[in-house]
Image: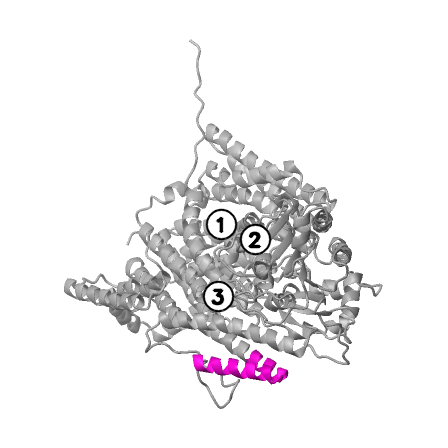
Amino acid sequence: MGIPVFILAGLLVHCVFLASIFDIYFSSPLVHGMTPQQTPLPPPAKRLVLFVADGLRADSLYELNSSNTSQAPYLRSILENNGSWGISHTRVPTESRPGHVALIAGFYEDVSAVAKGWKENPVEFDSVFNQSKYTWSWGSPDILPMFAKGATGDHVYTFCYTAESEDFGAHDAAKLDLWVFDHVKSFFNSSRSNQTLFSALNEEKVVLFLHLLGIDTNGHAHRPNSREYKENIKKVDKGIKEIASMIDNFYGNDGKTAFILTSDHGMTDWGSHGAGHPSETLTPLIVWGAGVNYPQKVKSQFFEDNFLKEWKLEDLKRLDVNQADIAPLMASLIGVPFPLNSVGTLPLEYLNNSAHFKAESIFTNAVQILEQFKVKMSQKKETTLSFLFTPFKEPRCCHPRRNRPLSDSEQINFLKKTRLYIQQQRYDEAVSLCKTLINLALEGLSYYHTYDRLFLGLSIAMGFVGWTTYVILVIIKTHTNLTKTVQTNNKESTVLFYGFAFVGMIIVFFLLIQTCPWTYYVYCLLPVPLWYAVVRELPVIQDLATNLLSLHIGQSIGFLLVCTLGIEILVFSFFYRSTLTVGLLVFAGWPVITQLWVQAKTTALIWTLLCVLLAIFPLMPVLGREPNIPLVIAAGLLTLLISCFSLAPLCKSENKYRNNEDMKVHFYQVLSIALSTYVVSSTHDSLKNKQGLPVLNQIISWMTLVSSSVLPLLSPTFLFQRLLSILLSVMSTYLLLSTGYEALFPLVLSGLMFVWIYMEQEALQHYGLSLKPKLAVFNFAYATDITQFRQLHLDDVRRSFFFVFFIVTAFFGTGNIASVNSFDPASVYCFLTVFSPFTMGGLLVLKVVIPFVLVSCAFEAVQVTTQLSSKSLFLIVLVISDIMALHFFFLVKDYGSWLDIGTSISHYVLVMSLTIFMMLMNGLAQLLTTKRLEFPRRTKHHST
């Protein structure tokens, strides 16, 4: 298999492994075909007003300030005198789209849907808005359209400001909320002169939705503990007071309006969200008005947190809910059918109504969730062979004496018994039975949703092991002297091929009769060709086993133990960044352990110092840090200093034409660094003074980003000149994306990479594998023409491990990129401040990739200077990263806290992305180091 074909096959296999996690853990939970369920009794409210303060943390609203007063005095008085309150617990990912879907539709959208867009519906779903008679909504163009588009008929109306208004660098983002409040007031005023609108507003089952984005925008721009964030809460509080008063007056204080205030997600102290930190998952919930309980006084209540004492609310009953529970609460208050896909449980303690109404409402809730369970079960039953189908069984924890399926007859028994209790006015027993049924139905839904998880997981694991084994065999067969060439028996080969083809046909038949999705065919058939390729190399395996048995067994076990320990350290570093520090300190002692320092004392000393310097970064705080622009400026000035010192080699060049052109490129790069340093300083000053992002700075930033990908290709291909050119180009972009100490990271990392190249030369000479080439005149352009590559040595495993370790250090050195919330939105402010999730996300990914590029280019230099083919070392790297990926695949879980679940999945996705990246970076590094764009030469015209 040639290198391009092998890389292509590897990319394809790893893309399948990466995609599989979304099919196994993140497939859509939605089912269709249920009938709407509605409480038969008249509702307490005719209309509902939903205020969603985007990005509002629970503690920011409930806590008292230093003068013992609330940031939101009106809402504080409501929860103390007029309504019920609690904490709404959100789920990962804590983003606006899934948060609003949970609030308004009652189900938790799968993560993959977030990537499909904020404004569009990747899947059709029902919502409270869809079930209402009329819904009017005001707010962000990123949220409102998705509920209007999914609604049947023309009864959901949206009023949005422009997307450009969502500017993190604006003078005051609270203007977004004031826009909403002003437009709601003018809307009601205009209805007095519009009979059609006036009549519609006086209908029953009306929803008014106010999406308030200012708090979220101010939180991103200034942090939640800032004056701007707190002032925004005050403005929202005042606006809610005015809107509530105006609505009550409009309807003549008829007492038929219910109000709900909540948030889609919280926010970390450093102004981001997306992960499972309590500051992101704990949001406020205050409900008041028609059909809502008044504050309930209590003497004591127990919660694991200490918030009640901090907020001085110990004597008022706190009613916590899951975010999806708010949808059935809204449906119950205004008497609309529960959203078809809702998995929320109606929080009865919020209702101020008769016991009969509560029992009927929770019964409707139970039937609605049971409908989903029945559809899910019948779907799974239809697509599974009858003798293989295992129905969901009632857990023993519910009824210790029985463990039987929640069959049709069992469901009917539950419903009959509940209906009998309601008829006999035994409402408490009816409610208790309904809650049991809801819990069982939800467990059953989860059971059928994850029914194929073990089967798919085993298929992927077999594929992983097969692929890794095949790569190891390729390394041993083509790049080492451990085995001799073995002639393959054509007859045996044919039998083997037909044997595996037969296995593949059985799998296809098995999947076909179960009408499985096409992705199942990919996951289940992938191990077949991989294991066929492995079994074909059986003579190589036998030959290898014979050779290994002849070696000293102690050495072999020792080598395996060291390899295992190294991979475990890499895995551990994903959980604890400080592990990287320990690893780098061990690396610092490498020259002493191997006696390399004897032949290269100066290089070894610099290596040790740079390892120790780099070891500091993983110990630095990653989350919650304040921007430190002076450090970014210092990094820019240090880069300028380095670029000035590097002028000497260019000045000594003999080719004057080349020298002039190279000097121009170098000058452009120096100018780019200087401009980037200036832009970072002036942009953050401008934003600090609330003057927005200067247009000139924005233009310079984007031009720098574009030019940084071209300039290295114009520089000489001599080893250190090209690597320095790459550093200067990416550094100009990295500075623009930096907000603190991380700006120094690429400088220290690239310094260590330069020394690593020298150290590998010393190691090569130390083991007598090759003569030491002159690195100063080494040219990348001619390195690829080497026809005689040496075979792999045991020390090359160490080289590959160094590369993987440096890659992981590049990823985690300045932050935990496995966590969405570790990104600081301020990093992209030199490029844009108007909210654009995909552009911002792309820039943040670029920031992560830049150190990766530096390490990849250094590794390319190590490969060519140690006379190894780019394929041989890379294959060892592939094995190391695949073993890590398999490790994380088995660590993925869907239980425990949302932080644990999110982390386990993001680790697997990250290590798989890293492997795919490394394949792509292998090609990119070759392009960046070997190719050169030529300047067009000017033709001199001589006069005759």
Q: Which structural element holds mark 3?
A: loop
Relative image position of residue 25 (x, y in whole percent): 46, 66
Which residue position is annotated with label 3?
A: 29
Q: Quadrant of the C terminus?
A: top left
At x 62%, y 41%, the residue is 676
Amino acid type at image mark 2: Ala
Left-right relation of 122 to 221: left
User: Residue 171: x percent and y percent?
Assistant: 73, 45
Residue at mark 1: 853
Q: CA distance from mark 2 to mark 3?
A: 21 Å
Q: How many neighbours does mark 1 have within 10 angstroms: few (below 14), some (14-19), or many (20 or more)?
A: many
Dominant secondary structure of the magenta stretch?
helix
Q: Secondary structure at mark 1?
A: helix
Residue 502: x, y in percent?
A: 22, 67
Q: Residue furthest left?
A: 491
Is there a contact, CB below 8 Å, between mark 1 and mark 3?
A: no
| Residue 414 falls inside the magenta stretch | yes
> Closer to the observer: label 1 or label 3?
3
Colouring scheme, one of rainbow, by chain, secondary structure, one colour: one colour
Q: Amino acid at mark 1?
A: Val
Q: Foreground: 811 or 761?
A: 811
Q: Which residues are magenta?
A: 408-436
For the point 44% across and 82% down, which residue is it? 409
Q: What residue sits right under mark 2 in the picture?
A: 148
At mark 2, the secondary structure is helix
